[in-house]
Amino acid sequence: MTSQSRTRVFSALLLSLLATALHVASTAPVEPEDESGFNYIPGSERGPENWGYLKEEWSACSEGQEQSPIDLAREDVDVIWGAGNLRRNYNPTKAYVMNRGHDIRLRWDERRAGSIKLDGRDYFLQQCHWHHPSEHAIDGRRYPLELHMVHSAAEAPHNIVVVGLLYEIGKRNAFINQVLGGIWPEMMTLGEEIEVGRIDPRDIIKDGQSYYRYKGSLTTPPCTEGVVWIVNQKISSVSEDQIRLLRRLVGDGARYNARPIQPLNDRKIRFFYEPDRERSIESMTPLHINAVAS
């Protein structure tokens, strides 16, 4: 083989390796699949206050300055009238449920479940999961349950937008019942995906266009920062037995799988208020009235 031929072969090999590396990076999950090695038990060796010291790559959990969750408190909220630069475009598609030990995850086929458009950029829905009690608080109050819808940009999968939905105790939640109603015994097995048919993400948030927005992080290790949070203002309903089921399915160290509230550190929270036709300023909660007045 001539020197020129060897050079061409070597160049082709380099290009192949580079293409493989780029493919792996582009298809890597926005959250690590293996999140073992930590728990939610306060004061334990692997509890939330020690996450940042368990692995070097988890250091943001203790050293980060824009961590989540936070308290969406009235004195830190700027009200903006209108829905802002947020548009939802979801589609029903095949989905799979997995017990990850620390939570229950629902995953859709890649990019087929649709996306949200934020500030002119599309972020595709990847998965959703639940935390009990809620991780975010509103004016100091934490709710019984919170759902996170994780989205990522196709061209930059580590650019993440998470949509949060809070629940209060009331009637059974139709979406949770649809996802877990017929398969919960099988969900006792960790790490196995179970197909649950076509699931429509539009069934998660039925109505309500008002939301809080701020810049934060993932709420589990590695606590990566740069995440845009959209927390829906409309509170959904869930029954006590549905929350008990979610707690029963996860491990002992995640029965209460909510990370403690993190410091705001001078971050500002924006509340995008899109009033319903029949609503007026007088019907807003005290939190929003005070925010408008500030």
Image: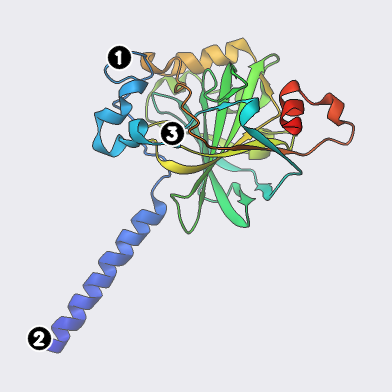
| Residue underneath mark 2 | 1
| Residue underneath mark 3 | 193
Please tell me whether mark 1 or mark 3 is closer to you in this view. Answer: 1
Q: At which x and y percent is residue 93?
A: 60, 44
Q: Which quarter of the image is occupied by the C terminus? A: top right
Q: CA distance from mark 1 to mark 3?
A: 30 Å
Categorize mark 1 by other alpha carbons within 10 Å: few (<14), some (14-19), many (20+): few
Residue 287, compared with residue 22, is above or below; it is above
Categorize mark 2 by other alpha carbons within 10 Å: few (<14), some (14-19), many (20+): few
Left or right for 192, reference 139: left
Q: CA distance from mark 2 to mark 1?
A: 63 Å
Residue extending furthest toward the right: 278
Task: Name the amino acid, label 1.
Answer: Ser
In front here: 203 or 76?
76
Whether residue 200 is visible to the viewer of this picture, yes or no, is no
Q: Which quarter of the image is occupied by the N terminus? A: bottom left
